[in-house]
Amino acid sequence: MTASDLVLRRATDDDWPDIIAADARAFMFAEPLDDAAQADLRDKLRNDDVVVVYDESGSHAPVLAGVAMFYRMALTVPGGTRVDLPGLSWVSVAATHRRRGILRMMLCELFDQWEQENSAFSILTASEATIYERFGYGPATSAQRVRVDLRRARLRTPAPIHSPVRYADADLIESVVPTLHDRWAASHPGAILRSPVWWNMIFADRKVRRDGRSTLHYLLHPDGYASYRIAREDGRPLVEVSEFFPITDTAHTDLWQVLLNLDLVTRVEASIPTDDPLPLKLTDLRAPTVTAIDDTMWLRVLDVPAALSARTYPGDLDVVLEVSDEFRSRGGRFSLIVRDGAATVAATDADPTVRMDISVLSSIYLGGFGAGQFAAAGRLWAADPQTLDALDRAFRTDRTPFCGTFF
């Protein structure tokens, strides 16, 4: 097989059986998506946003060697601005076609499109942590998985007896939950906004998403909501929280009050922000055990000036920022001046006072990682401690960014 035997193009309707089968193999599904789940997926995508690579060598029928696609999404950046951006997903190369440049071929094609569309960012959720840094992506949001022992978990200040939290039927869920999520996302950096077709998939709650667990149960609060499933381990029930989006501290307490008082279960598992106050609200802060901390979303700055100008900053800053970008040459040297929360960015020939790779800029952009952390790791250089401190403070956010949506 030669490079000319690998044909890259945009997907057609006829490619989808191959795509679904390849996805099931690549991500170790027990079986491919059923027809209903495939219809949900197709509603969120356009064929023109799906790249396929076929191996046309030999006399056999063309074989799908690689696939990559993206959703058209929106993200909240620090300060509350919502930016449209591509969410890279479903990236796979057949195990029979590794190390032939197929992944790079597909990503170059998609990056060309995103740059032509003037996208300032791209995001993804990574199945492996070692793949995407070479393409300029950096981990930008994290979540901690906690296991809460209900035998020990009691709120220090219990919610009122007459709690506003209620279970809801399907009609109420569909009319209220998207609005609650949108309110939550407006004030949380890193939050992904959800389109109506995205909600259609969530509310359909297909069997393939349950993986042997119960259908979703929704708890509604005037200022937030939670959803959970019932699972079983060694024959005993446990609760797995699917989504937990409180808009206020009161809603956070009220929703946890219900979850901590569910009958017949001794454990609740949830994925929550790394700065979530739950342990401090309990009489026993060891009742929740952190079982893992996961990188939940990776971000890639595509346009440095546009990205830096899109967010707000809590501290003033005056640096010459040098950004390296080996993959796309989209870096450069920029004057970055922040006053009263707003950034002014311009290309410059002045000597740099800060240097970093574009993957590092992508990681610190939402505030999930600090400039000081990367400096300590030898991945960011600043001219002096004062410059590093100012940079660290300027990119800080009042809460840890949280994505909240897997894609």
Image: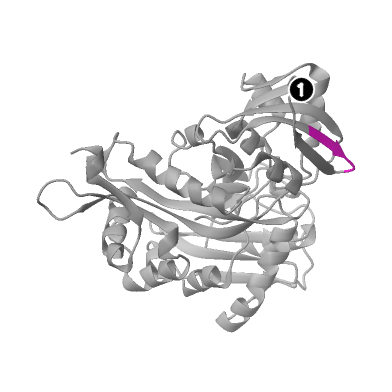
Q: Main secondary structure of the magenta part?
A: strand
- Characterize the local packing of mark 1: few (<14), some (14-19) or many (20 or more) Cα atoms within 10 angstroms: few
Based on the picture, tell me whether residue 338 belongs to the magenta stretch. yes
Residue where numbered disc 1 is placed: 350
Residue at the farthest bottom position: 171
Q: Where 144 sits versus 87, above or below?
A: above
Percent x, y of residue 308: 73, 41
| Left-right relation of 249 to 71 | right
Q: Which residue shows up at 80% across the image and 46% down it? A: 312
Q: Residue furthest left?
A: 59
Give the image location of residue 151, x and y in percent.
Answer: 60, 52
User: What residue is shown at x 45% (from left), y 33% (from top)?
Assistant: 130
Residue appearing at x 58%, y 43% in the figure: 299
Q: Name the amino acid, label 1.
A: Ala
Residue 248 visible (yes or no)? yes
Is 368 in front, or is 153? 368
- The stretch in magenta equals 336-340
Quarter-of-image position of residue 368? top right
Q: Position of residue 101 (x, y in %)?
A: 33, 36
Q: Is residue 381 above or below residue 121?
A: above
Q: Is residue 327 above or below residue 230?
A: above
Q: How is the image coloured?
A: one colour
Location of the N terminus (image quadrant): top left
Residue at point 43%, 44% (across, down):
107
Residue 406 in the magenta stretch? The answer is no
